[in-house]
Structure formats: structure tokens, C-alpha cells
């Protein structure tokens, strides 16, 4: 082992980086951006699940429970009527509502209470705080009913999902799309850079090919690959992982196709800003990680700090993830306005990216 | 050989930042001519070829190719361009590469003839990544001429090629020129210069001298083309 030779390799490596300012910038900027985002996302988030309370109790104890729920730190509460509850769950303004029935006080006096808990159910992470808040409120109730123990048996109803709906079902719906988006993006950006570095792009530009033809040809080629991949991902997710699906498989496939087309064109567009495959690969943390953090895959967009929600609203992945969850978890079809919006926005992004990719593909070299 | 100019550059200049790659170049190439661009590395040969096929735009002067001002996409279907490096798709076979360039030029029927011309028809199934440098160059040439272009631009096509293959290449070039194809070929190898009908000597982005190889020898005052070139280059520097 020669220290001199080892030093020569180390020095050669650092000399190369010294001249590659873009790589250096990404090396030091990307971690700050990603960690800063994560910190802001986790610490800056103040919102807690919104829960409706329908207190129909003719006696006094319902008000005691409602009051305890209002003071819970786990949830934010609103008074509603039980009849409005499902509509509020569907429009997303509530994640749950609790109905304290008209005979609630009588139930408590008899030692058995059965409040109704209606959970939206598509985000398992929201269910625990609701049930925790209710449990604390009922413990508080028990202390008010002197002389006897109170047995709690909340009756839980799910709008979507169900008791068997687990974290994998929630994340799976989003990841089915994300996996396709991410891999297609990486393959496209590296392939396009290859085209540049092996000199074939120069040849294409000196041929009668039009820029739009190159972009469309690439898009179709990668979309074919992406669709095969999407089918594989879907079959594995549904048949092997048994991820819950309430929707039409063709709709999921359609949404995946839209995401693949967006990813292909994002790859072509961004490849214009990289000079080597090495630099292109560095776009991945800067482009993909913030989208993964902000598109609602891991943290619901509604729980993000307000400033980040604006950012989430302009990311294509936010709409794609929302659309996938609407289809797979809620069984949405194309009559749903939310799915129309999600599919429309992702399709719109595809059009914008095709135009941007075509516009930035320069025929001339300098 | 006709007096119609396939390529006509008038007072063309091109800079990259502060670096002047070409400086007031006037150059005319007749139809059916084999024109050699000679000059050391970095003299401006590749820039000149890229200007002719519209990959670069001149900062000053005009570039007219086959009667059209460049850049002009419509002219490109009549141009064949062989880049300095053998720009091919390594994962595709020889035949697939040539077929691809034939397809984008609308000349699918020319694949077999192009492969036969570069003597690669029997190797058409070989994957490019597995080929030697010389075979790649031959495949690259086939890609450039598969659509039977009127103007063939060859940027140092014989770099890294063994002498035997070089002779074969020049046979092909002469045959195409005889059929009316105009060929502009860049090289810094002097023994290739004698094979051209006319030569342009480029240094520091300027056209130092132009003429037949015999003219260049007279202008440089030496029977040896290399010495003639060095003499002309020396006069330019002094």
C-alpha cells in the first residue's frame, strides 16, 4: 500500500470536483434544502385533525364529553349536526365526527356508553388522535358519574377503508404512482444525457428531425416502457401486497400513464440543464425528494404549514397522489370532480412539460 | 464537376465568448468536389462544418448551402454529417443504427446499399458496443450516407483507422463524388490532403490558403505538403 498513490487518487477526485461547480453546489445545497424542508414540515405543522361533534344528548353528560373533546390537544373540533357529518367527511373539511346520541346521559348512568365515531378512514394517521381524544373525554366522564364504573363501547364507522385498512394501504396507493414517476424520470434524464454525450443528439440535430418529433418519439418510447412497468407495479401491489383497492384498475393505470408522461417530459426538460449524466443524477434529490415530502405521500398536505401548502399546490405529484388515493382508497371514478381536477392538472402539467422540453431542446450548439 | 457552388461561405465569423473560432472566412465548394479542410487541432475545422450544417449560427457573414441560407432545416435532408466521434447507439446493432438514421431521413430503402458500401453488410447483426474503433467508424459513415445526401460532411472520419481501411474509405468517397456528391472532409493528416481535389488550410480561425494540392505546394514553396503547410502557417504568425 503506497500512501503516495492513495493521495494521488484522493487529490485527483477533489481536483475534479473543484472544476465542477454545479456538482459542488448541489452537494452542499441539496442537503440544506431537503433537511430544511423536512424541519419546517415537521416543526412548523400546527394543524390537528378536524373533528365534528354532534351532541344530541337530551341529558347533561353529552355536553361534558363535548367540552372535554373541545379542550383536547389532539384534535380541533366543530359543532355539527349528525345529518351533515358524512357530507363534511366527503368534502374533506372533517376527518371524523362523533355523535353523542340523545340517550347518551342515560347510557352513562346505566354504565354503558356507545358514542358513534364516524371516521373518514383514508388516512390511518388521523384515526388514532380522534380515538385518543374520545377516550380521554370518556375517562373524564367516568369521573363525573359518581358511584359506578362506565363501560365504553364506541361504535366506529368508516366512510372509506375500514378496520383492516392499514398504513400500507394508505401509502401503497401513492407509491404505486410514485415508483413509476421516479424511475421513469431517472431513466429519461440519463438516456437523454447519453444521447448528448455519445454525440448522437448532434447527429439528430443535423438531420431533418424536428424538435417536437424528438420529444414525442422519446415520450412514446418511454411511455410504452413505463406502462409495462406500471402494469407490473399494479399487479404486484394488488395481488402480492394485497393493497386495498376500491376503484377501477383501468383508472389507476390511466393515472399512472399520465404520471409516466409527466416524468418523461420532466426528464427531457431538466436534461437541458445538465452537462453530464453525473450532474443529471444530482437533480434527483432536488426534484424528487421535495415532491415526495410535499405532495402528501407521507404527510397530508392539509397538515403542512400554510407556506408549504402553497408550494404543494403547484407540484404535479400532489395531484397525482391525491388522484391515486381517490381511486384506490375512496373508489373514485371520473364522475368525481376531485378526480377530474387531479387528472386534469396532471394532464396539464404533461402539456406544459412537453412544450418546455421542446422549447429547451436547442437545435444549435452555441 | 460543375461550377455550381454546393457550399458558399462569405466573410463568416464565429466566436465562443472571447474566443474567435472563425474570423472572416470565405470559402466556396463546387458541386461534386472533394474539398479538404486542413489544419491543426483547434484551428476551426469542426466549427466550420457545424456552421455548414446549421448546428452553429454565424455571428457575421452568410452561409449558403445547396442554394439556401443556413440555418435551414429543409436543407438538412440533403446533408450527411459524420461527427468526429463515431456517434452511434452502442446498444443497437450495426443494421439497427443505419436503419434508424435511414428512417429519420426518409430513406429506409438505402440501408443495404449503405452497409455494402462500407463493407459491413455481413456484420449488420453485430452490436455496436462490441465493435472495434475502425468498425464503428465504418458504421458511422454508413449512417451519414444512407440517405444518399447531396453534401457529405465528414469531420476527421479516418482518425484511428488503419491504413487499409483508410484506402477503402477514400475509394468510397471518390465513387460518391463521381456520382455527384459534394464531400467536405476535415483532417489534420497531411497524407490525406493529396487525395482531395481542393484544399483549404485553416489556422486560428482564418483560411490561410486555398487551392489544389499542387497550388498549396507552390504557395508554400515546398514539394512536401506538410512543409508547405508549415511554411504558410509560419507566414501567417509572423
Image: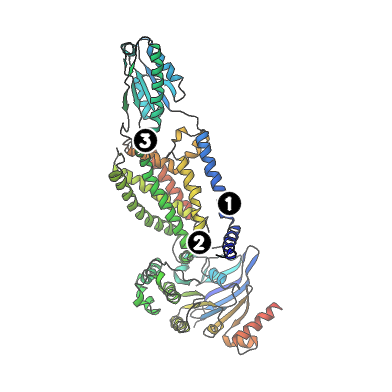
Left or right of A328 in this view: B143: right
Left or right of A231 in this view: A212: right
| Badge 1 or badge 2: first in the primary sequence | 1
Q: Helix or strand or loop: what does disc 3 sit on?
A: helix
Give the chain of mark 2: A
Q: Helix or strand or loop: what does disc 1 sit on?
A: helix
- Residue B218 bears which disc, if any? none
Determine which quarter of the picture holds residue B91.
Answer: bottom left
Give the chain of mark 3: A
| Badge 3 or badge 1: first in the primary sequence | 1
Location of residue B65 in the rendering, given as x and y in whole percent from the top left corner: 52, 71
Residue picked out by circle 2: A363
Location of residue A359 in the rendering, given as x and y in whole percent from the top left corner: 49, 54
Q: Is residue B147 shown to the viewer in this render?
A: no
Location of residue B81 in the rendering, given as x and y in whole percent from the top left corner: 47, 71
Location of residue B51 in the rendering, given as x and y in whole percent from the top left corner: 55, 68
Residue picked out by circle 1: A25
Seen as rendered, the residue at the extreme left is A239
Using the image as rendered, state which of residue A281 and residue B42 is in the foreground: A281
Residue A98 sits above or below residue A260 on the image = above
Left or right of A155 in this view: A136: right
Using the image as rendered, state which of residue A66 and residue B194 is in the foreground: A66
Give the chain of mark 1: A
Residue A192 sits above or below residue A75 on the image = below
Q: Nearer the viewer, mark 3 or mark 1?
A: 1
Same chain? Circles 1 and 2:
yes
Q: Are marks 1 and 2 in contact (CB under 8 Å)?
A: no
Determine which quarter of the picture holds residue A328.
Answer: top left
Residue picked out by circle 3: A337
Amino acid at each position: 500500500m503506497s500512501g503516495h498513490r492513495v493521495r494521488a487518487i484522493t487529490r485527483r477526485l477533489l481536483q475534479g470536483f473543484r472544476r465542477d461547480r454545479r456538482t459542488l453546489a448541489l452537494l452542499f445545497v441539496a442537503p440544506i434544502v431537503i433537511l430544511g424542508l423536512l424541519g419546517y414540515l415537521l416543526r412548523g405543522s400546527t394543524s390537528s385533525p378536524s373533528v365534528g361533534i354532534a351532541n344530541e344528548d337530551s341529558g347533561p353528560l353529552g355536553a361534558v364529553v363535548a367540552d372535554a373533546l373541545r379542550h383536547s390537544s389532539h384534535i380541533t373540533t366543530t359543532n355539527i349536526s349528525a345529518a351533515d357529518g358524512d357530507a363534511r367527511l366527503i368534502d374533506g373539511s372533517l376527518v371524523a365526527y362523533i355523535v353523542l346520541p340523545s340517550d347518551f346521559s342515560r347510557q352513562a348512568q346505566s354504565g354503558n356508553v356507545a358514542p358513534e365515531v364516524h371516521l373518514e378512514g383514508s388516512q390511518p394517521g388521523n384515526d388514532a388522535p380522534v380515538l385518543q381524544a374520545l377516550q380521554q373525554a370518556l375517562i373524564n366522564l367516568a369521573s363525573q358519574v359518581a358511584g359506578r364504573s362506565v363501560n365504553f363501547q364506541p361504535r366506529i364507522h368508516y366512510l372509506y377503508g375500514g378496520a383492516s385498512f392499514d398504513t400500507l394501504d394508505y401509502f401503497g396507493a401513492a407509491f404505486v404512482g410514485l415508483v413509476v414517476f421516479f424511475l421513469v424520470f431517472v431513466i429519461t434524464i440519463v438516456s437523454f444525457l447519453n444521447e448528448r454525450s455519445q454525440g448522437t443528439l448532434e447527429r439528430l440535430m443535423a438531420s431533418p428531425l424536428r424538435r417536437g418529433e424528438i420529444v414525442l418519439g422519446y415520450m412514446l418510447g418511454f411511455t410504452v416502457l413505463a406502462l409495462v412497468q406500471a402494469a407490473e407495479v399494479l399487479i404486484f401491489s394488488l395481488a402480492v401486497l394485497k393493497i386495498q383497492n376500491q376503484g377501477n384498475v383501468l383508472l389507476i393505470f390511466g393515472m399512472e400513464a399520465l404520471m409516466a408522461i409527466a416524468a418523461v417530459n420532466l426528464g427531457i426538460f431538466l436534461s437541458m440543464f445538465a452537462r453530464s449524466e453525473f450532474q443529471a443524477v444530482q437533480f434527483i434529490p432536488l426534484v424528487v425528494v421535495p415532491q415526495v415530502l410535499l405532495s402528501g405521500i407521507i404527510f397530508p398536505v392539509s397538515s403542512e404549514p400554510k407556506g408549504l401548502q402553497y408550494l404543494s399546490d403547484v407540484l404535479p405529484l400532489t395531484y397525482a397522489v391525491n388522484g391515486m388515493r381517490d381511486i384506490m382508497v375512496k373508489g373514485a371514478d371520473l364522475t368525481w370532480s376531485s378526480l377530474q381536477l387531479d387528472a386534469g392538472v396532471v394532464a396539464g402539467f404533461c402539456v406544459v412539460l412537453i412544450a418546455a422540453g421542446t422549447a429547451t431542446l436547442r437545435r444549435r450548439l452555441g | 464537376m460543375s461550377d455550381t457552388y454546393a457550399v458558399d461561405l462569405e466573410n463568416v465569423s464565429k466566436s465562443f465568448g472571447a474566443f474567435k473560432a472563425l474570423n472572416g472566412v470565405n470559402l466556396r465548394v463546387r458541386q461534386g468536389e472533394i474539398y479538404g479542410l486542413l489544419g491543426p487541432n483547434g484551428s476551426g475545422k469542426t466549427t466550420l462544418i457545424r456552421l455548414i450544417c446549421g448546428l452553429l449560427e454565424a455571428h457575421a457573414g452568410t452561409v449558403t448551402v445547396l442554394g439556401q441560407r443556413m440555418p435551414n432545416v429543409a436543407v438538412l435532408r440533403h446533408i450527411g454529417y459524420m461527427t468526429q466521434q463515431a456517434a452511434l447507439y452502442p446498444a443497437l446493432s450495426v443494421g439497427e443504427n443505419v436503419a434508424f438514421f435511414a428512417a429519420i431521413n426518409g430513406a429506409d430503402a438505402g440501408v443495404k446499399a449503405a452497409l455494402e458500401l462500407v463493407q459491413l453488410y455481413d456484420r449488420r447483426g453485430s452490436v455496436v458496443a462490441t465493435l472495434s474503433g475502425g468498425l464503428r467508424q465504418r458504421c458511422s459513415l454508413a449512417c451519414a450516407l444512407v440517405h444518399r445526401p447531396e453534401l457529405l460532411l465528414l469531420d476527421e472520419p479516418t482518425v484511428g483507422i488503419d491504413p487499409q481501411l483508410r484506402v477503402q474509405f477514400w475509394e468510397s468517397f471518390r465513387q460518391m463524388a463521381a456520382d455527384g456528391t459534394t464531400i467536405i472532409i476535415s483532417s489534420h493528416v497531411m497524407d490525406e490532403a493529396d487525395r482531395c481535389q481542393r484544399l483549404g488550410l485553416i489556422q486560428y480561425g482564418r483560411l490561410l490558403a486555398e487551392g489544389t494540392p499542387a497550388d498549396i505546394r507552390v504557395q508554400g514553396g515546398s514539394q512536401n505538403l506538410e512543409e508547405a503547410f508549415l511554411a504558410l502557417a509560419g507566414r501567417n504568425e509572423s
